[in-house]
Image: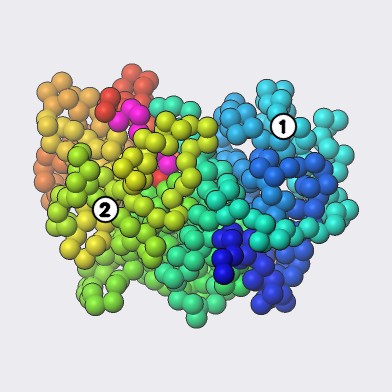
Amino acid sequence: MNIPLTPLRCLRYAQQQYPCRTAVVCGDLRFTYAEFADRAARLAGALRASGVKPGDRVAFLSMNCHRLLEAYYGVLDAGAILLPLNIRLAPHELGFILNDAGAKVLFLEKEFLPAVESFRKTVPGVEVFYMLDSAPQADWMASKNYEDLLASASPFRTDIMDVDENSVAEVFYTSGTSANPKGVMLTHRNIYMHTLYACTTDDPTLEAIYLHTIPLFHANGWGTAHTLALSGGKHVMLKRFETKKIFHLIEQERVRTMCLVPAMATALVNCPDRPNYDLSSLRVINIGGAASSPTLVREVEEKLGGSCRSGYGLTETSPTLTVSRMKPGISWEGDQKYIGQAMTGFAMAGVEIRVVDANDQDVPHDGVSIGEIVTRSDVVMEGYWGQPEATAEAMRGGWFHTGDMATINEDGYLLVVDRKKEIIVSGGENISSLEVEKALLANPGVYEVAVIAVPDEKWGEVPKALVVLKPGAQLTESELIEFCRSRIAHYKCPRSVEFFASLPKTGTGKILKRELRKKYWGGQDTIRPEFATRKSGSS
């Protein structure tokens, strides 16, 4: 018997097995799984009644909220494709994505009304605009808002047997670097298989109470919209990253797990209000989205509690590929524990990973040789929306080429050393900016750091460290350079250090190195020609 593989089965299962369990906490609102499933079904019914057809793109411009979580199921139940939009994008960028994807419907929160007003006339394909969290605000908007739609709709649940598991379920747009962003097409099968594989990496006996610190508009919400439903866990929604709010929700809801990018983790462990809250419920903290460091892993475990581990994935892979927990048969003692847990990790179930050289030949598993990560798995995207050539390039040879450079050791653990285009080539030597950043982050006075290439007459380019210090810390350029030289080879160390009050970040908290580079390269984000066609979509 073959039953279509679709994430819709996750919520159906939770509704059947955990109808009375709390599914979602969003501000003052609480919904059981029975209520959550009913609201998602009413959304599906409302969309169908409004004329949404199978394959239509339905966009959401929303912060983390129960309504966006409902869309992960209701839009798919209606047969449509979910298009979550990055709330940090500029109006013209949002307009580009809506036109490129051919979106038919846009749901938006009141906060983003000015942005939508500024570009709405440039997106003629969007036939209807719905307010999510308020009454309609203009005559060009639908007369009903989201709650009105649900209240007047009849629930609709598609027959699972009618779902084409290979049809596109969600489209997420990667961050544009040297070109416009690309739409990543994830199928029903991609998402469901990712859910099953991800669940095998967690302790099934652990009652899941998850705080949504990662935006749901980013990289399939890191899979949590589906894995949590399948386990009957509690979704605790967080609209904005605010340290005090996070601590309050952990204490109030007894949160057991959350995901963070390194910048988030750094902010939490250094928050002076942290000791005022009871964080004892925390069991697992996952760090991804950018490379972590052993220093940060240690601080998270010591100051937040629970077990901290790293992971790796991309928008194009649904997203998780690896996890850095300790394998059976391996013993990490002392500091090796933090070094191991800060690594990129080993492939999770269902994922094949290789590290290859320029000729797509495997590099030695020695933890030293550097190559590009390639992967094949059920979780790898269908392709890029409307870009067959870019898809073929990324998928050449039957493997998805990530553009991330890494080593792999004899135990199968990866360690990402850099994006291809961010490797610093100085005097013919390849320098990993991530390795230099980890060395600098070991200094107790450093809050965060970005290492970039800057032009140099003699060596072509050299490393430069852009540093934010912790409150009260006092360090000089020469002190930091000497600190770095005590830990890694001198040629890898920054030739200069510049101090900043803060560093620019993406909507998901990753440092925007491309913006930082422009200051030193005449206003351009320098990209060497051999990397100019590479994509960027890591989660």
- Please give the count of numbered marks on the rendered protein: 2
Q: Residue at the location (52% across, 72% down)?
A: 256
The color scheme shown is: rainbow
On the image, the x and y values in percent for residue 402 come to 34, 44
Task: Give the labeled residue for mark 1.
Answer: 126
On the image, the x and y values in percent for residue 74 come to 71, 54
Q: Residue at the location (45% across, 54% down)?
A: 379
- Start-end of magenta stretch: 531-537
Question: Which amino acid does the dot numbered 2 rest on?
Answer: Arg
Q: Is residue 437 above or below residue 42?
A: above
Q: Mark 1 vs mark 2: which is more N-terminal? A: 1
Q: Rounded to the nearest whole Å, what is the CA distance between mark 1 and mark 2?
A: 42 Å
For the residue pair 412 and 233, the one nearer the viewer reads as 412
Mark 1 or 2: in front is 2
Q: Residue at the location (66% across, 35% down)?
A: 103
Question: Which amino acid does the dot numbered 1 rest on?
Answer: Val
Q: Which residue, as the protein is rendered here, is positioned at the far front? A: 1
